[in-house]
Image (cartoon, helix red, strand yellow):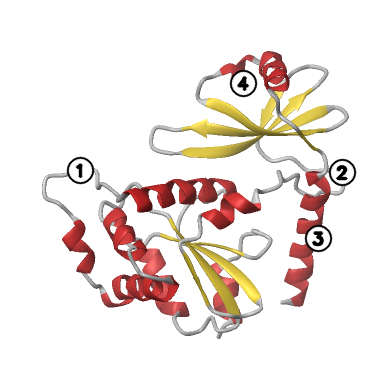
Amino acid sequence: MNKVRHALLAVFLCMCAMHAEVITLDEAKLQMLKGKNIVLQDPALSIKGVIEKPDSYILKVEAQLPQSSQYMTVFLDKKTSELYIGSGYDKEGNAILFPQDVNIITQGIAFSYGKGEVELYIVMDPECSYCRRFEKAVVGKLDDFTVHVILFPLPIHERAPAMIEWIMQGKDDADKKARMEDIMLKDSMHYEVLIKENKSPFAYSEFVDAYIKKANLATMELNVRGTPSLFNAEFTPVLQEELLEEIK
């Protein structure tokens, strides 16, 4: 476990070092970068951040998809204006990662529980069968962690929005946790009182709708591709298998 933590710390330090190279993205700089390659002029793409290197720019680009959005790391060659999308590595073989915005991620937290020294972020869809299986496996076993839950309804789950609305109506973090566990561990159907017949898609309350927007931004920042997704305090992905083995 110590070896894994040391490796994750090394990645985090690398990200911190890159953070110093992030440049301010004013309108003039934005137009200059877009003008270098026609792909960047696509209305579905927007540049959200830039790291300047001697020979290239590393761009954080938001791609708007039909039902969601996601961030991509894009490499723009200064000399040729050629564009490369995907993973990049320095000469030492370390992944080139765009620094994550801590504020965006923490604003996506629905509730937290536990007082352990080790922080754990869990992205959950309460209707997701894999999330329910995971929740059953860890219930009562995360005493050594402080757990932050980000609620993320997958588009394929029609009841997830109502479930999340019900959870978020809890009066405090403890109540929200209890409501989530009632749904995921006990198959509670209390949330059904919120579902109105013949009304689709589900309409969130104003408060929860504002939260969902923050949660969506947080999951984009974390590069979430499915649920459940786990991350440590440095927002590095944590494998379910490793966590379950650790808490046995």
Relative side of 87 to 78, left or right: left
Residue shown at 42% from the left, 76% from the top = 174
Label 3 sits on a secondary structure element that is helix
Numbered disc in front, either 1 or 2: 1
Q: Which residue is mark 3?
A: 10
Q: Which residue is mark 1?
A: 200
* Residue 29 drawn above or below residue 8: above
Name which residue type carries label 2. Answer: Lys
Q: Are marks 1 and 3 in contact (CB under 8 Å)?
A: no
Q: Which residue is mark 2?
A: 91
Numbered disc in front, either 1 or 3: 1
Q: Residues within 10 Å of mark 2 (few under 14, many from 20)?
A: few
Label 4 sits on a secondary structure element that is helix
Which mark sits nearer the N-terminus, 1 or 3? 3
Residue shown at 66% from the left, 49% from the top = 100
Q: Which residue is mark 4?
A: 40
Residue shown at 77% from the left, 29% from the top = 57
